Amino acid sequence: MKDSLFTSLILIILQFATSSRIECIFKMTNYHVLGIAYTCQFKDALNITSPDSFFIFSSTGNHLDLKSYDDVLGLNAKNMKIQYFPKGLELIFKNLKAIDLQRNGLKELYQSDLKPFKGLVYLDLGVNDIEVLEDGVFDNNPHLEVISLYSNKIYQIDLHVFDSLSKLNYLVLDKNRCINKSSRFDLLGVQEIIQNTKFMCQNSEFMKGRSMMQRRCSNHDDSSSLKIQLESIEINLQNRISELKQVVDELKDCRCKMNL
């Protein structure tokens, strides 16, 4: 029953998405922390230019001796014109531990993109166009040790993005819009990064000429909105207190005159 439902779902997706067969160049690749891993390197560009419009249904390529798809731990798709995360990879590469999608113009990253890769250890998304890291995006990837997001366009990092990553050792964020830092991971350091990013994102000089981005900042920054509301309430209360004091003083003055 489950198999038939899964098959039906795949057929529905294929009706609305461009399906494609990828060609792999299989090789051994050395990844930081993970070490040497059997890898599929994409041979041809995919040209994924809209979300949910592209589905990978099969792969070809000559495996190294005694190797199969079950042995593939790494995926190298650098500079393959992938603006949105490709769908269907998990149906072919079921044991991925390393994904490298550098230099693709990748525009966004969601929890659903990474959910199938629960054993992921290494993720390199450098030199792309990602702007926001939302809470929960890495919640299904508890084994991540390396995340590289250098040279993106990040202007917002939600407060609890990395909370589920107890094994994270390296976080690279060089050359982003609101931040420029890379270091070994530590929770206090990341909280500082998040706060600095929020400050830079809201800085009027930095955001000059980027009104759309500024609106997105304000829409996502609930804490800032709450702070403004509280400040407004405080001012109103202070005004009311001043008015009440004035009324009390007038009443006192009136009583004094009546006693006279």
Image (tube, rainbow, N blue to C red):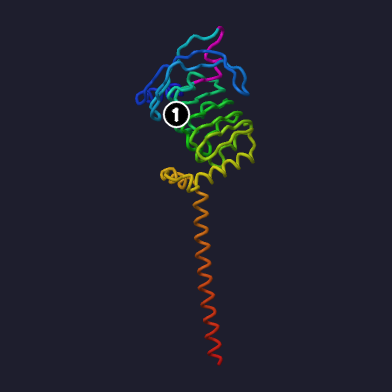
Residue at image point 53% right, 72% down: 242
Q: Residue furthest top?
A: 65
Residue at image point 47% right, 37% down: 131
The answer to whether residue 241 is above or below residue 214 is below
The C terminus: image quadrant: bottom right
Where residue 244 sits: x, y (%)?
Answer: 52, 74
Element on which disc 1 rests: loop
Where residue 82 sits: x, y (%)?
Answer: 43, 25
> Which residue is tagged 1?
105
Where residue 69 sits: x, y (%)?
Answer: 52, 14
In depth, the one of 141 and 29 nearer the eye is 29
* Residue span colored magenta: 65-76
Quadrant in the picture for residue 32? top right
The answer to whether residue 244 is above or below residue 196 is below
In depth, the one of 175 and 15 nearer the eye is 175
Membership of 75 in magenta stretch:
yes
Where residue 26 sits: x, y (%)?
Answer: 52, 13
